[in-house]
Image (cartoon, rainbow, N blue to C red):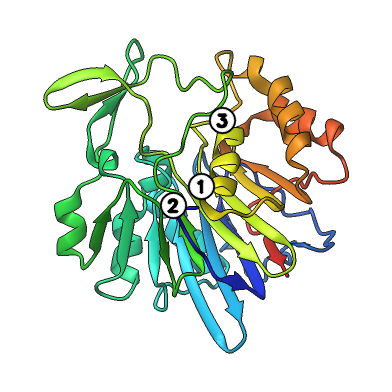
Amino acid sequence: MEMTIRKADRVTLTVLVDNYLDMFLQESRAPMHRPPLPVDWQLTPVAEHGLSLMINIDAGSEKHSALLDTALTPATFLRNLKVYGQDLSQTEAIILSHGHVDHCGGLLDAVRHAPRGCPVIAHPDVFQPRKFPGQQGSSLPVVDSEALRQAGAEIHALRAPSSWCSDFVGVSGEIERSNAFETGFPGAQIEVDGTWRSDPFHDDQAVILDVKDKGLVVISGCAHAGIINTVRHAQKITGIEKVHAIVGGFHLTGPAFEPRIQETIEEMRLLEPDYIVPMHCTGWRAINSLSEAMPGQFILNSVGTSYIFE
């Protein structure tokens, strides 16, 4: 065990940005709570290829909040913050799941809206140049650490697991690759010391929460390390076996990743989570396969949905 996180009485996740939006999904059942239809139809939510979640913790008289990822574009991130009435002024940590732009696009604006000195937790590789060779416009924007500092961020570039928000919010650090089928992102490259090389996505990390009497809530951004590897790593470093919920992007979309869907489902069944909430880069085929294979645990996500685990 490498990390101790405190048990929360209640964890509330609010999905600020995701790839999918259906405002007429009105059914709510625990732990899922759909937002009401807009009052102002000139200010409606937006979906895009990106991810951002607010995390709120209740434990006795303590309340804590953190932000995981900041979507693809500042406009969408800021718009949905306003639509859902989310306030970053009390945010205690901004956590980056990895360095791709669809998770960091609104980062500078998030820092500006958060308290000055708010920690930004990221692996050092988040700040390295990256590209997808062979595709037009393949070079990805680089996270500008100096601009973040000037805006008031306190950057924590960490490889190891860490805990935040009075030790209620765990960050996995580098994720151990423990199986043979989750083999990374073919063709992705990273520049290290002036040399382009295959990107192992060492910066891919997850948020780990522990709900009292329920178990772990594991939240991935894209799970480039593999969603099964991610959950197994969370179990290992916390010493907690029970998995309550697996939430976030599983990166099973597209021809390079879809062959992993069936084995992922088989391993997911072995983890026995109470809930599975696939998002973002999981992909249509994988989402539908999960819904058919694990209908009792599966929840279809939509922008604005909140999940209350207690």
For the residue labelled by badge 3, is the local secondary structure a helix, a strand or a loop? loop
Q: Is residue 298 left or right of residue 248?
A: right
The residue that mark 1 highlights is 51
Query: Looking at the image, which residue is at 58% across and 13% down?
Result: 255
Can you identify the residue that label 3 sits on? 251
What is the quadrant of residue 175 in the picture?
Answer: top left
What's the amino acid at mark 1? Answer: Leu
How many neighbours does mark 1 have within 10 angstroms: few (below 14), some (14-19), or many (20 or more)?
A: many
Q: How far apart are marks 3 and 2 (CA)?
A: 16 Å
Alpha carbon distance from label 3 to label 1:
12 Å
- Residue 194 lies, with reference to residue 122, above or below; the image says above
Residue 155, how many percent across, how many down? Answer: 24, 59
Disc assigned to residue 69:
2
* Quarter location, residue 58: bottom right
Q: Position of residue 298 (x, y in %)?
A: 79, 44
Query: Which of the marked residues, 2 or 1, is nearer the chain's N terminus?
Result: 1
The residue under the point 61% across, 71% down is 7
Kindly identify the amino acid type of the residue bearing the numbered disc 3.
His
Q: Are marks 2 and 1 in contact (CB under 8 Å)?
A: yes
Residue furthest front as drawn: 1
Numbered badge on residue 267: none
Q: In this view, does 111 lie above or below 292?
A: below
Farthest residue, direction bottom: 61
Taking the spot 32% from the left edge, 14% from the top edge, the residue there is: 133
Q: Which of 72 and 296 is in front in this view?
A: 296
> Horizontally, is 92 left or right of 190 in the view?
right
- The mark that comes first in sequence, 3 or 1, is 1
Q: Is mark 2 on a helix, strand or loop?
A: loop
Dot 2 amino acid type = Asp
